[in-house]
Image (tube, helix red, strand yellow):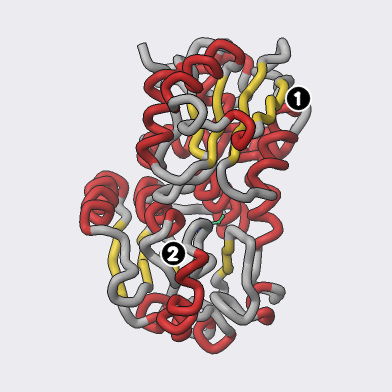
């Protein structure tokens, strides 16, 4: 049987997402107390795109869980080039208890999960960034005390991985997610439909606004991201023009709720998608957000380790199995 993986945000049900966030908070409170990867079990970690936060937070987090971060140089390995993704998957599954991979196409990640025989975690693809979203939600919960019922406005390139992930994960958390993006840069209709379907079960909602002011007005959480995602560097000049009105500066932020917080997954380009004053200002929680990557990803690894039967559920401080009593 194929073990559970985290390939996209809606791989977690609302109850599972809440449990993972509870677990992340518990790990944050006691970072060295729980060792579900004791052995140490190895977790293969591969990057086909640049990384800072993801590589360091997975390395530190896997070690804190008692495991061994097996950093695999994906250029040397030549995943999908020197060997097929399926063959690499079968080899990695024989060496590691889980695979963490950042790559381009979502389909390649799915192929890895189909053949590895171990849980696979999406460390960012062109389409989704679910680990970032769990860190984002943890950060919102810390600063606003809750998630359900809050309005989150994502402004900028709504068609990128962060736009898609905010739609799915925000709807799963029962939030009202607004995407503020120019014509041609909105998430697909299929993505909106998937998120809207989830929202009907959680009390959340999703909507698109072409006007950045309409998108941000009254929001409790305002999120932006680079206008030029990794792999789109050739489009930088054209995008700078299209997205200029969506810059999250003091003027635009003034339309949000007075207590609104600002998130950015980083790296940030001050003066492009966000002004220096906003990124470095009092509403910004981006450094907590960056730290929370580690806690959130530890929770994902532990959740998947329990579901794969690698570690007993009782190893964890929070119940992550349906019907499990403590
Ligand atoms: N949308 C950005 C996220 C960076 C963490 C990218 O894919 O480059």
How far from the left and from the top, in percent, is residue 123? 54, 41
How far from the left and from the top, in percent, is residue 92? 55, 18
Whichever of labels 1 and 2 marks the residue nearer the N terminus, that label is 1
How far from the left and from the top, in percent, is residue 38? 71, 14
User: Given the current orientation, which residue lies at the most extreme front position?
Assistant: 82
The mark found on residue 152 in the picture is 2
Which residue does the image show at 56% across and 22% down from the upper left? 98
Q: Quadrant of residue 42?
A: top right
**Residue placed most toward the observer, 248 or 216:** 248
How many residues crowd mark 1 within 10 Å: few (<14), some (14–19), many (20+)? some
Which residue does the image show at 29% across and 71% down from the upper left? 184
**Left/right of residue 194 with respect to residue 156 in the rendered view:** left
Q: Are marks 1 and 2 in contact (CB under 8 Å)?
A: no
Instruction: Determine the secondary structure under disc 1.
Output: loop
Please tell me whether residue 266 is drawn above or below residue 174 in the rendered image.
below
Residue 275 visible in the snapshot: yes
**Residue placed most toward the observer, 26 or 39:** 39
Instruction: Determine the secondary structure under disc 2.
Output: strand
**Left/right of residue 179 with respect to residue 76 in the rendered view:** left
Q: Is mark 1 within 8 Å of ligand 1?
A: no
How far from the left and from the top, in percent, is residue 200? 23, 49
**Residue placed most toward the observer, 321 or 295:** 295
C-alpha separation, residue under disc 1 versus residue under disc 2: 33 Å
Please give the residue where the numbered disc 1 appears in the rendered image: 33
């Amino acid at each position: 049987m194929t073990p559970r993986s985290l390939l996209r945000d809606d791989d977690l049900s609302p109850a599972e997402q809440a449990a993972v966030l509870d677990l992340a908070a518990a790990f944050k409170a006691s970072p060295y107390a729980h060792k579900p990867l004791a052995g140490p079990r190895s977790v293969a970690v591969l990057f086909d795109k640049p990384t800072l936060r993801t590589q360091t937070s997975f390395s530190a987090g896997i070690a804190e869980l008692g495991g061994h971060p097996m950093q695999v140089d994906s250029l040397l390995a030549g995943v999908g080039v020197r060997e097929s993704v399926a063959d690499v998957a079968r080899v990695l599954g024989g060496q590691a208890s889980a695979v963490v991979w950042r790559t381009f196409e979502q389909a390649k990640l799915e192929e890895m999960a189909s053949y590895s025989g171990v849980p696979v975690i999406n460390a960012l693809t062109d389409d989704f960034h679910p680990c970032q979203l769990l860190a984002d939600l943890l950060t919102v919960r810390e600063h606003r005390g809750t998630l359900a019922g809050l309005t989150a406005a994502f402004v900028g390139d709504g068609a990128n991985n962060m736009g898609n992930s905010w739609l799915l994960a925000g709807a799963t958390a029962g939030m009202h997610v607004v995407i503020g993006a120019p014509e041609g840069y909105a998430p697909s209709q299929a993505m909106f439909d998937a998120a809207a379907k989830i929202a009907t079960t959680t009390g959340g909602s999703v909507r698109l606004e072409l006007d950045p002011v309409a998108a941000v007005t009254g929001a409790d959480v305002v999120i932006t991201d680079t206008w030029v995602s990794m792999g789109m560097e050739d489009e930088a000049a054209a995008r700078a023009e299209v997205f200029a009105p969506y810059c999250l500066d003091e003027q635009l932020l003034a339309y949000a709720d007075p207590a609104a917080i600002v998130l950015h997954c980083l790296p940030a380009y001050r003066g492009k998608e966000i002004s220096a004053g906003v990124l470095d200002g009092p509403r910004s929680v981006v450094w907590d957000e960056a730290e929370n990557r580690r806690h959130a990803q530890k929770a994902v690894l532990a959740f998947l380790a329990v579901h794969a039967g690698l570690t007993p559920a009782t190893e964890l401080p929070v119940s992550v199995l349906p019907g499990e009593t403590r």
